[in-house]
Amino acid sequence: MNAPTVPTKPDPSYFASEQTVRWCPGCGDYAILKGIQRALAERARPREDTVFVSGIGCSSRLPYYLATYGFHTIHGRAPAVATGMKIANPDLDIWVVTGDGDGLSIGGNHMLHALRRDIDLNILLFNNEIYGLTKGQLSPTSRLGTRSPTSPGGSSERPVSAVRFALGAGGRFVARALDVQQDRLPEILVRAANHPGASFVELLQNCSVYNDGAFSFLTDREAGPRQRLHVRHGEPLRYGADGEFGLRLDARTMKLEAVEVGPGGCSEEEILVHDEHNPALAGLLATIGPPDFPLPLGVIYCDPAAPASRPVGKAAQPAIRTTDEELTAMLASEGTYQLT
Ligand SMILES: Cc1ncc(C[n+]2csc(CCOP(=O)(O)OP(=O)(O)O)c2C)c(N)n1
Ligand code: SF4
Ligand SMILES: [Mg+2]
């Protein structure tokens, strides 16, 4: 059989399937799909070597719209299915597509262990802070006060932060991106895919029907630049339309401070420089956001060290092959049995 090939410089449309894309008008999933197709074109891996594994939710419809392999699995279980695929075929480029409910509620346990085990998966968590598919119930990332069919009086539960969760689970590549930012999204996805081991990208996604405008504070033409902090390794942590604000560390309290830079404010030298390899800084960046701080976007943490052990893959754990007859005999036998 011929090895799969790919055009030298594929167009993003090379990765689009023939299916009609079905999300609500204005849904942020359209922009994310576009960003993913651009990232795949940039990577130029054969379609036949690429798999998108999803759980259940609006976001999890994504594999239908890509001309790669795809598996629409069951609620919250995409990381488990993807782990099995990676064990069976470590050479595949495997992406996990999940939602805030799918990945952090019913599938939170699976997500935790996929990150902890550092399985070489590219995990994309579409966070619209609501259950979209099932018509707008509260999700684990919904903000305090969110009114929904399951919280008519406003949510009283503190939301989980996807980025803090991923860092806490031991994630070695943790990033955040905004659905509509096509100038930045593909680059972040390419970096996530190139990272050896588990990579986790929180994608802030507008649900135009059940949680419209949840991220308008970031996209607003006037106010947005003061609310977004694009972090880039080696560059100062500055934000605002002209970079007139920045982050400084108060060494006494070990807390970040949002300050004005320039005459009357603090000096440029006082502004922290982003070091994506620094887990302490990643922890600080993961905790900040409005109203007192901008929201960090970009690669917040990337541990470049080769993983100490590669827990999955043919070399580390050769697949155990048994014949159907052997398996049937084992299952029919009494007591315990040993695979050899
Ligand atoms: C075991 C199980 N429980 C509940 C459901 C119902 N269900 C389907 S999708 C969903 C929520 C999806 O929300 P999210 O992951 O945020 O995805 P979105 O639709 O917002 O993209 C729920 C509760 C189900 N399909 N299976
Ligand atoms: S319900 Fe929300 S998340 Fe689902 S397709 Fe519609 S806009 Fe998108
Ligand atoms: Mg959701």
Image: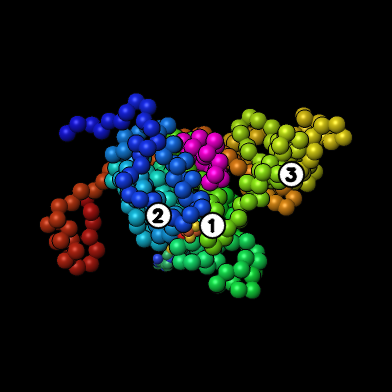
- Dot 2, crowdedness within 10 Å: few (<14), some or many (≥20)? some
Which quadrant would residue 298 be assigned to in this image?
Answer: top right
Q: What amino acid does circle 2 point to?
A: Arg
Q: Which mark is residue 256?
A: 3
Mark seen at residue 208: 1
- Quadrant in which ligand 1 is drawn: bottom left
User: Label 3 amino acid?
Assistant: Leu
Secondary structure found at label 1:
loop
**Residue 36 image-quadrant placement:** top left
User: How far, Cα to Cα, is label 2 from label 3?
Assistant: 42 Å
Alpha carbon distance from label 1 to label 3: 33 Å
Q: Position of residue 270 (x, y in %)?
A: 78, 33
Q: Within 10 Å of the Cα at label 3, are there few (<14), some (14-19), or many (20+) other Cα atoms?
A: some
Label 2 within 8 A of ligand 2 by Cβ: yes
The magenta stretch spans which residues?
A: 168-190
What residue is disc 2 on? 22
Q: Position of residue 43 (x, y in %)?
A: 40, 32
Q: Is residue 326 left or right of residue 229?
A: left
